[in-house]
Amino acid sequence: MEKMNQTFFLSHGTPRLSIDDSLEARDFFKSWSHKVFQHKPKSILVISAHWDTEFPSVNTVLRNTTIHDFNGFPEPMYKLKYEAPGAIELGKRVKELLMVGGGMKRVDEDTNRGLDHGAWIPLMLMYPEADIPVCQLSVQSSQNGSYHYNMGKSLAPLKAEGVLIIGSGSATHNLSKRGYNVFTDSSVSWALEFDLWLRDSLLQGRYGDVNDWEEKAPNPRMAHPWPEHLYPLHVAMGAAGDDAKAEQIHTSWTSTLSYSSYRFTSSL
């Protein structure tokens, strides 16, 4: 079993990532196993923005089904499947770490839920063989960045157990402002400003500022009217550890949706 010393935050952008070869981010995800992360993990834990619950929840299933949780997209997208094995033992281990190590009073197990598009679309491009067990963990949008950072810290032991921890969300996510070009339209300059602030904060190790993003970031509520797409970042950041070094491994845009993605590397 190979120990992991890296965690990741991946911006998954639009569901069209699943089929649209014109998206620059699609090439990034498809190059994952030979350019970004060459190690094959024992299992994968995905914290997805698209599973938002009152209490932390893990899915514990034998095999993951594919949840097409989006509307109004081309019909072929609804026929795509990514049926990776479930990771029941990992789910129970996550629950143990959150309750015993993290002091959480309640962590639920969902024995029916499969993978939402925040998990299966990136994984379909990264690991198309669908042969690595996958478990999902939900976010709690009623909580804050520090809560999710501490959740990640509780999950840090998983790295030594061969688990790849991925937060899947979006560096910016304001769906009411689609259709603009961030490089030519000054009315959406907030998107670039937030994205650059996030990049600089992470690369400079100012994780406390990122935890307090609602107070420290420029235009926080324009970039994220709701916080669920940013919280997977905090979990990945916390799981990496306070001394981890951040690296931006991709950046591109679809309108005001940033695909900025990050690797966090800690000492083994």
Image (tube, helix red, strand yellow):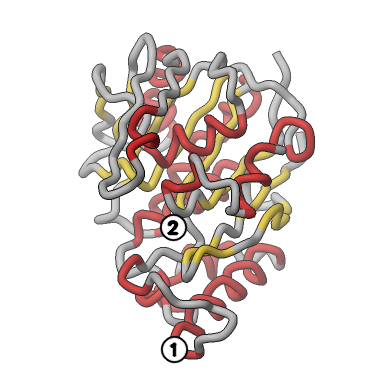
Query: Residue 21, percent across and down?
Result: 59, 46
Q: Which residue is at 45% across, 48% downward?
A: 16
Q: Residue furthest top?
A: 62
Answer with mark 1 or mark 2, whichever residue precedes in sequence. Answer: 1
The span from disc 1 to disc 2 (Cα, nearest Å) is 22 Å
Q: Which residue is at 53% across, 78% downward?
A: 182
Q: Which residue is at 67% across, 45% downward?
A: 27
Q: Nearer the viewer, residue 256 or 225?
A: 256
- Does residue 113 lie above or below 36 as drawn? above
- Does residue 101 lie above or below 180 as drawn? above
Disc sitting over residue 230 in the figure:
2
Q: Is residue 246 visible to us here?
A: no
Q: Is residue 119 visible to us here?
A: yes
Residue 54 lies in quadrant: top left
- Does residue 122 lie above or below 73 as drawn? above
Q: Residues within 10 Å of mark 2 (few under 14, many from 20)?
A: many
Query: Residue 113, percent across and down?
Result: 27, 24
Under mark 1, the amino acid is Ser
Disc sitting over residue 57 in the figure:
none
From the image, tell me which residue sits under label 1.
187
Q: Residues within 10 Å of mark 1 (few under 14, many from 20)?
A: few
> Which secondary structure lies at badge 1?
helix
Residue 64 lies in quadrant: top left
Q: Nearer the viewer, residue 226 or 185?
A: 185
**Could you tell whether 91 is left or right of 198 in the image?**
left
Q: Which residue is at 35% across, 61% downward?
A: 227
Query: Quarter holding the N terminus?
Result: top right
Q: Residue furthest front?
A: 75
Query: Residue 236, percent across and down?
Result: 54, 45
Under mark 2, the amino acid is Leu
Query: Residue 44, percent across and down?
Result: 54, 26
Residue 212 lies in quadrant: bottom left
